[in-house]
Image: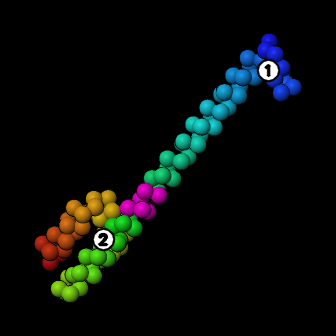
Amino acid sequence: MMPPLFGMEWSINVIIAYAFGIILIYLLGRMFLMPLRLIFRLIYNGLVGGVMLWVVNFVGAHMGFTLAINPITALIAGFLGLPGVILLILFKLFIAG
């Protein structure tokens, strides 16, 4: 038996229960935060891709070239960055005609 701390009798069982509870709360928190991080990362990448597509459309409007800005093209540009935008431009030029 351990000496009283803060007016409570602390046994090894109570300490183990508290440690187990803290570890369980930590693991549950990580389990629920990982999907939220993925969702926020997708939203962020989609917004960055949308801005890059907007820049292409702004510059390309003077040359008669535009790309559609929709969730698919924004996510492609967001995931792949500049190579994704180049891929979309090449797709529009060579495949979509």
Nearer to the camera, 29 or 59:
59
The CA span between labels 2 and 1 is 60 Å
| Location of mark 1 (residue) | 10
Provide residue 8's location: percent of width, then percent of height. 85, 24
Provide residue 5's location: percent of width, then percent of height. 81, 23
Image quadrant occupied by the N terminus: top right
Residue at 67 percent across and 32 percent down: it is 21
Magenta-drawn stretch contains 20: no
The label shown at residue 52 is 2
Depicted 27 relative to depicted 32: above or below: above
Residue at 75 percent across and 23 percent down: it is 14
- Is 63 on the left-hand or right-hand side of 6? left
Q: Label 2 neighbourhood size at 10 Å, few (<14), some (14-19), many (20+)?
A: many
Residue at 14 percent across and 78 percent down: it is 97
The amino acid type of the residue labelled 2 equals: Met
The mark that comes first in sequence, 2 or 1, is: 1
Magenta-drawn stretch contains 42: yes
Q: What segment is highlighted magenta in the picture?
A: 40-45
- The residue at the far right in this view is 7
Type of secondary structure dominating the magenta stretch: helix
Depicted 53 relative to depicted 3: above or below: below
The label shown at residue 58 is none
- Is 33 on the left-hand or right-hand side of 84? right
